Structure formats: C-alpha cells, structure tokens
Amino acid sequence: MQTFILRERPLTDNILMLADEGKVFKGNYIAIIKENTFLNEWSDKERVKKFRKQKMLDNYLTKNYPEFEINY
C-alpha cells in the first residue's frame, strides 16, 4: 500500500491510500481517501471515500485537490 498526504491540517491530515499494483483492498477498492473536516476545537470528523475505478479517482482528485499530482 502507498500512502500520500493530500492536505495537511492542524489536527489530522487528508490521506490517500493506494493499493499496490495487481492488488486491491477488501471490497475490490483500488483507493481509499480519508478526509477530515472541522468538528470542534479538539477533534475532526472523518469521512472515508472509496474508489473502484481509476477514472473516478482521477476526477475526484482533480476536482478537490488540483495541486496534487500522482504518478501511477
């Protein structure tokens, strides 16, 4: 598994986890994004997005994280 930081935040970071080549995560997912949004001063709310297709992942990354470049 490869891990990338998409956006650094004060409490927690937004993280992209990619499965290694030829492998998938449980549920047949190729990528998982863990996004954190502000909940209160002490914690963040975590939202998990899972992707089965590379095209959908690319569309999501270009829309929400345009500064992030990934080389497969």
Image (tube, rainbow, N blue to C red):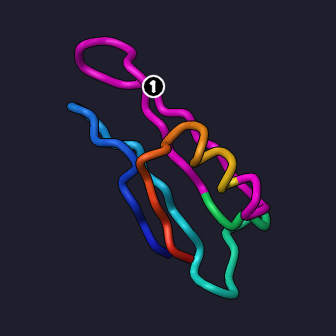
Could you tell me what secondary structure mostly forms the magenta stretch? strand
Residue drawn where x is 45% and y is 25% of the image: 45
Q: Residue at x 27, y 34 (%)?
A: 9
Determine crowd level at label 1: few under 14, some 14-19, many 20+ residues with C-alpha closer than 10 A: few
Residue under numbered circle 1: 45
Q: Quadrant of the C terminus?
A: bottom right
- Provide residue 37's location: percent of width, then percent of height: 43, 24
Is residue 14 placed above or below 27 in the rendered structure?
above
Residue that protrudes farthest toward the bottom in the picture: 22
Tell me where residue 12 sits by quadrant.
top left
Residue 43: % across, % down: 31, 23
Q: Secondary structure at mark 1?
A: strand
Residue 60, above or below 44? below
Would you say residue 39 sits in the magenta stretch? yes
Q: Quadrant of residue 47?
A: top right
Q: Is residue 29 above or below residue 10?
A: below
Whole-percent x and y of residue 60? 65, 44
Q: Position of residue 46 (x, y in %)?
A: 48, 32
Residue sticking out furthest to the top: 40
Q: Is residue 12 magenta?
A: no
Side (left or right) of 69 relative to 57: left
Looking at the image, which is closer to me, 10 or 46?
Answer: 10
Residue type at the position of mark 1: Lys
In the picture provided, is 32 more to the left or to the right than 54?
Answer: left
| Bounds of the magenta segment | 32-56
